[in-house]
Every structure is written in C-alpha cells, then in structure tokens.
Amino acid sequence: MSLKDRSCKPCKKGAPPLGEPEIALLAPEVRDWTVSAPDPAKPRRLDRRFEFKNFLGSMAFLNLVAGLAEAEQHHPDLCVHYNRVDVSLSTHDVNGLSENDFILAAKIDAAIA
C-alpha cells in the first residue's frame, strides 16, 4: 500500500526513531523531500520548499496542509515567505523521523499533484 493511502498512527513517547534502513525504504516515495543529515544535537526531519506565484498561493497551500495535518493528527512545522512555504516534518514523541512523517509528506505531494 502506498504511503499516501496509509493513515498516521500515534507513536509511543520515547520509542526509537526510524533508522537508516527504514528511511531508505520510505524515502523513494517522497523523492522531492530532503532527509536531514544525522546530527546528535538535532532530531532528523523531512524538509521541502514549495513555491507559488504569490502570497495568496502560499496561503491556499498552507490551509490545504493544515487540513491534511489535522485529519492525520500529525502537524508539521510551516514557515511562509511571501511566495514560498517551507515544510518540516518530524515526530517529537520519537525525537526524529517516524513513518507518520513520510505518510504526511506523501499526502501533501498527492494533494498538490
């Protein structure tokens, strides 16, 4: 089953984040996203920049992502810069990446395709 067809599931606080083998299996489904490099001082995350014609395009996208995030109960960090939106996904309960991050990334990709 494709990531975009799955649903986010609650993560147990303190559970381990995904390791390199799991990330390598999931990353091809969200090719336009960047997996942050391992850094002991920071949790790993998925990042992607989306660009639009203007501020209204950015805000429409922001509202789309907000709806998807709320439906999945998995909320990204969003930063609006006039005609672009930076999206970062990570799972605070595992202090890094979980399958939920890849699921939401795939759902965002599908929604704008």
Image (cartoon, grey):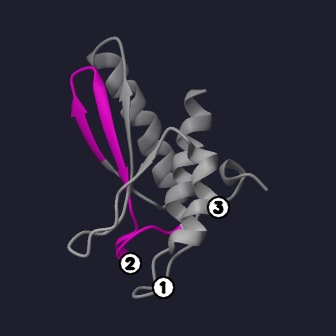
- Earlier sequence position, callout 1 versus callout 3: 1
- Earlier sequence position, callout 3 versus callout 2: 3
Q: Do the CB atoms of the residues marked 1 and 2 lie less than 8 Å apart? A: yes
Which residue is found at the position 41% from the left and 29% from the top?
A: 61
Quickly name the residue at label 2.
93
Amino acid, disc 3: Leu
In the displayed structure image, the side of residue 65 where residue 88 appears, left or right? left
- Earlier sequence position, callout 1 versus callout 2: 1
Marks 3 and 2, how far apart at CA: 21 Å
Q: Secondary structure at mark 3?
A: helix
Magenta region: which residues?
Answer: 78-98
Relative height, residue 17 to residue 58 (above, below) = below
Relative height, residue 9 to residue 59 (above, below) = below
Marks 1 and 2, how far apart at CA: 7 Å
**Front-most of residues 41 and 81:** 41
Which residue is found at the position 61% from the left and 26% from the top?
A: 113
Quickly name the residue at label 1.
12
Q: Is 22 within the magenta?
A: no
Relative height, residue 55 to residue 63 (above, below) = above
Q: Where's residue 112, x and y in %?
A: 55, 28
Amino acid, disc 1: Lys
Amino acid, disc 2: Asp
Q: Which image quarter: residue 65?
A: top left
